[in-house]
Image (tube, rainbow, N blue to C red):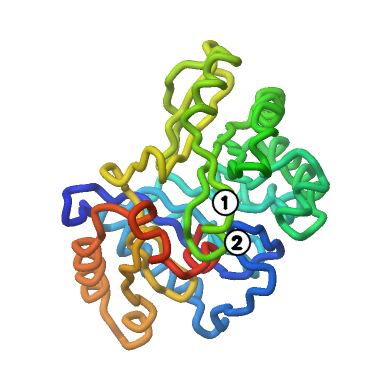
Amino acid sequence: MLQDGFGRTIEYLRLSVTDRCDLRCTYCMPEKFKDYSEPEHWLSFDEIERLLSVFARLGLRRIRLTGGEPLLRKNLPELASRLSRLPGIDDLSLSTNGTQLERYAGVLRRAGVTRLNVSLDSLDRERVQSISKRDVMPQVLAGLEAARNEGFRLIKINMVAMSATTDDEIDAMTAYCIERGFVLRLIETMPVGEGGRNTGFLDLRPVQERLRRRFGLVDGVVPGGGPARYLVSGDGRFQIGFITPITQHFCATCNRVRLGVDGILYLCLGQNHTVDFRTLLRSGGSNADIEEAVLAALRTKPHSHDFTSRPQRVVRVMSATGG
């Protein structure tokens, strides 16, 4: 099994298929950001499939396709289909900003993607435009309805909780998700890059208790490999998750790594430990060499992030890391 130096089982990989995005959300990518990876440095579909097949043989079970905006990668459903057929992979999901989802929902479902995470920070069109720097709310809502009609096993709404920006909309977003059968996940901002550090932080602990009382929620569990702590309704029909890397970090149970579009493996979102797999793949490394490199990389995975003690440590932007 895949284990790191602290005995944690690593079964979940977040795969960035592009560092491009058609939005410029303030907490993720600076509006004038242009420091993209060159396409010739991107892993090809063949390289991705080969590398992740090695991970799968070692015990990887879950893959999440991310970006940037993954649906901007040409022929992404083809890659999804190939990854969904890898022996050992029993969960293939995708994170998206929703702008392309109406077009791709059906083909993604047929390619083997069973779960979606869709970013939606507000139900106010002007506020969405202010956060993302693009007027895209109609496209996102249309994409969500298309995905509902395709029958994905789970559709989760990712809402970044931002003080003085979205904190007054949390109850309204909860009601929206209850009405449509979506799972809501509230996310604390993380100091990844300048944008993340400059976004108003909101402690989700009091929010969690307020929602527990207002909607009659109790502690529960929702399928998925992520770190969210969940509250559920008494009848089980609604779930809301809280991702709290700052106030209640989950480092002790971390089960994931991130692979950038350029083949760089990020061992911790809040640290700078990385391993270059593109060079190994393109220099003639055997599958045994790749396996050895994977196992060696996991032994260097840090125990915890430095978001609290050294928030300036991580200078890369979130979009370059893989979500």
Q: What element does badge 2 sit on?
A: helix
Q: Residue at x 70, y 61 (%)?
A: 23
Q: Amino acid at mark 2?
A: Pro
Mark toward the start of the polypeptide (2 vs 1): 2
Residue 88 seen in the figure: no
Q: In the image shown, does 26 or 297 lie closer to the viewer?
A: 26
Q: Residue at x 57, y 69 (%)?
A: 18
Q: Residue at x 62, y 70 (%)?
A: 20
Q: In the image shown, does 49 or 209 lie closer to the viewer?
A: 209
Residue 70, labelled with which disc?
Answer: 2
Q: Position of residue 320 (x, y in %)?
A: 51, 68
Q: Is residue 259 left or right of residue 80?
A: left
Q: What is the CA distance from the residue labelled 2 to the residue labelled 1? A: 8 Å
Residue 58 seen in the figure: yes
**Which residue carries the number 1 mark?**
95
Q: Is residue 28 left or right of residue 260?
A: right
Q: Position of residue 220 (x, y in %)?
A: 43, 22
The 10 Å Cα crowd at callout 1, few under 14, some 14 to 19, many 20 or more, is many
Q: What element does badge 1 sit on?
A: strand
